[in-house]
Image (spheres, helix red, strand yellow):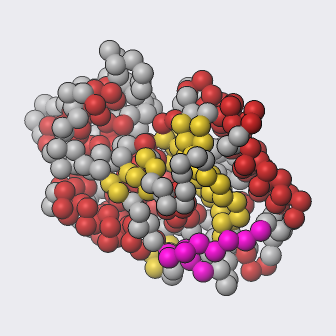
Amino acid sequence: MTGRIPLPAQPTGVAWPTLTWATAALGDERAGDDLDLAVEAAFRGPRAAELGATAAIVVVRAGRIVAEHYGPGSTARTKHLSWSMAKSITHAALGICIGDGSIDRDAVPVAPEWTSPDDSRAAITLTDLLAMRSGLRFNEDYVDADTSHCIDMLFGVGADDVAAFAASLPLDHPIGEVFNYSSGTTNILARRIGDALGGRDGMERFLRDRLFDPIGMSSAEPRFDAAGTFVGSSYVYATARDFARFGLLYLRDGVWERSRVLPAGWVDEARTLRSVDEDAMGYGLHWWIHDDETGAFAARGYEGQRIIVVPALDAVIVRLGKTPAEKRPALDRYLDELVDLVACAIEPHPEESPT
């Protein structure tokens, strides 16, 4: 496992993008041009065909936007669906509640369905759910409706009460021992947060007042089910720039304009490698871990939604679009190339060094 790269502070003299983003060129002009060309290539020509439909790309370096491009029908004001990037937003909301003391991280049972004295699910903790190691049965398939719990939960019999659907499922594995990526576990967490805040109205107000507004994420629209639970597994709409703001919050260790939004240590827990999936991708707590020399970690969503946070380069890359599953390896390679181009282009300055 690669050691955690220190999270860089906002460079001196660079305004926080609470209201508007500053833009800048990268340090090396030729490499900066290469980055622009690579970003534009995702929207037309052979590279675009390899990647599927790309709606937006935003590249942030040292707190400024250094590359940005939008596809047909999309602009800087267009709101896009997060899909599973919302899981990382749920992680942020839970951290704030734990920091406030409104949720006890160690209290069990997490779900009211597990209160029976002989229910072994009662031992599942918030951390087990965050790490996708709850042991609960859940098939995250997005295609086969006959086997997918995810499709049933979001669009079928569980859609009116996503958390109750997920919490009703049995254990398939010992708690804490097996990684199983599951949108259901996130919705159990989202309901737990909402219950602590007084239901849907309290949750909406909390997300706005404590998370979205402080970082200028004004476009964000969380969606709720009929039971009043935030569908924290999948449903936040926001602009590409606002998803970049969320990535910058994590790049800055949960601090924004000298105020701490997330509890100290919460980001480091999220980006600590805990599991590796069948595709050799690392996972922490509701964030995916690249586990490489850049220290990158990412919020990832269905069809290729990405917020990639790169501490070693003081960078955030957002990509939104519709990439079918068979083209995902090409998309991952392309995004790695963007990271490499940022690495080639930057010229470190003393005032931009991590503190």
Most extreme residue toward the right is 30
The image shows residue 288 at horizontal and vertical percentages of: 54, 44
Question: What are the residue bounds of the magenta stretch?
Answer: 15-25
Most extreme residue toward the bottom is 13
Task: Please give left or right for residue 119 compared with residue 14 in the image.
Answer: left
The image shows residue 138 at horizontal and vertical percentages of: 34, 27
Above or below, comparing residue 240 to residue 54 in the picture: below
Name the residue located 33 percent from the left edge and 27 percent from the top edge. Answer: 151
Q: How many marks?
A: 0
Q: Is residue 16 magenta?
A: yes
Quarter placement of the C terminus: bottom right
Q: Is residue 160 magenta?
A: no
The image shows residue 101 at horizontal and vertical percentages of: 27, 67
Above or below, comparing residue 23 to residue 54 in the picture: below
Q: Is residue 315 visible?
A: no
Name the residue located 53 percent from the left edge and 48 percent from the top edge. Answer: 73
The image shows residue 342 at horizontal and vertical percentages of: 77, 57
Q: Is residue 78 visible?
A: yes
> Residue 123, located in which quarter of the rendered image?
top left
